Image (tube, rainbow, N blue to C red):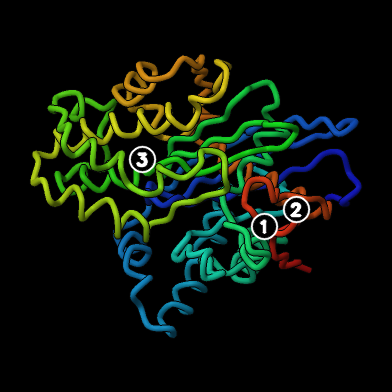
Amino acid sequence: MTNITSNTYNVIGLMSGTSLDGLDIAFCRFSVDNNNWSYQIEQADTIPYSDYWRKQLVSLETADALTFQQVNTEYGFYLGQRVSDFIVVNNLNPDFVSSHGHTIFHQPEKKLTVQIGAGAAIASKCKLTVVSDFRSMDVALSGQGAPLVPIGDKLLFPEYDFCLNLGGFSNVSYQHNGQRIAFDICPVNIVMNEICNKMGKPYDDKGEIAASGMLSTYLLNELNQLGHYKQVANIPKSLGKEWVLKNIYPLIDQYELADNDLLRTFCEHIAIQVAKALAHKPAGKMLVTGGGVYNSFLMECIKKHTAHEIVVPDKKTIEFKEALVFAFLGVLRMRNEINCLKSVTGANRDNCGGSVCIYK
């Protein structure tokens, strides 16, 4: 394995988001020279979840304790096998694996966050050292445990004024008074994919369904009045599935709108909240990544509402930026360097999160 004093690291990053699109796996190379980091995504793939794993991940939050722990371990073996297959197919020689896992509970106000995928199970299957459980230390230090990507934004993408991600949730990060500021803005694919799933579709391809819908100003106004959006823009705040279940679905269910009208309205809601979150900042370059980038209608809505210059990067960065950054968080953990910022999460101090299972 690469020594922690090395300047080059070859790491496999694993990411599973709340939208349940599948497992993102990326083999990344990082180099550092005089504290300046560079990266390359060498190989990457998204492995769709089987019906079995979709059902397991969706239902696990209501399972009994024994079932929960069994699935936690089984999912770890599943991740380890996917890593092993990925290594063989692409003839790779990684130094270690860095795994986000899949979030089942995220309630930082209760000092609780759980991402399943046991690190020991992953390590035993792929025969590599594994870094996992990145959020627990920050939550224990009274932080939100999210978002974690901003340290990667700061060190890997310094040329952009803003880094916006459109995944299960939208989140943004930027420099402000010498500190990195970051926060979750609003739900995106976690809601829109659920609406599409009820139509028998995995997602709204290019936003064509939303584009065919009618805007409901009544629902839009109610969505925009939710308490989360009234918080100060740049304070640490994060969103989870629980918040969506409590606040979004009951609201949209009240209106009994056609699915395309719901999608049309929700796209407008996302665009308004993204613009509002950055309205206090001078116009600048904004890197936009995540699956939402492929929703052309959503992107047009965002462009309509903001003055910032939107920059869409190459396909690998769009799709695998989170896997890239979690690979990078693992590098920082192995170097015993800060990988979670209190200015982002609201924790008592900057910290170095991640549990390490060394395979020997």
In the rendered structure, the answer to whether residue 73 lies left or right of residue 259 reads right
Q: Residue at x 30, y 58 (%)?
A: 245
Which sits in the foreground, 83 or 284?
Answer: 284
Q: Are marks 2 and 1 in contact (CB under 8 Å)?
A: yes
In the rendered structure, the answer to whether residue 278 lies left or right of residue 173 reads left
Q: Secondary structure at mark 2?
A: loop
Q: Write down the residue under mark 3.
A: 188
In the rendered structure, the answer to whether residue 309 lies left or right of residue 54 reads right
Q: Write down the residue under mark 2.
A: 350
Q: Residues within 10 Å of mark 2 (few under 14, many from 20)?
A: some
**Cα distance in 3D space between marks 3 and 1:** 26 Å
- Measured from the top left, where is residue 12 in percent x and y? 64, 47
Q: The N terminus lies in which quarter of the figure?
A: bottom right
Q: Residues within 10 Å of mark 1 (few under 14, many from 20)?
A: many
* Location of residue 90 by image quarter: top right
Closest to the camera, between mark 3 and mark 2, is 2
Q: Is residue 344 visible?
A: yes
* Residue type pointed to by label 2: Asp
Q: Secondary structure at mark 1?
A: loop
- Measured from the top left, where is residue 99 in percent x and y? 60, 56
Number of the label disc, if any, that sits on residue 347: 1
Q: Are marks 3 and 1 in contact (CB under 8 Å)?
A: no
Q: Which of marks 2 and 3 precedes in the sequence?
A: 3
* Residue type pointed to by label 1: Ala
- Measured from the top left, where is residue 121 in percent x and y? 59, 70
Q: Is residue 90 visible?
A: no
Identify whether 333 is placed above or below 306: below
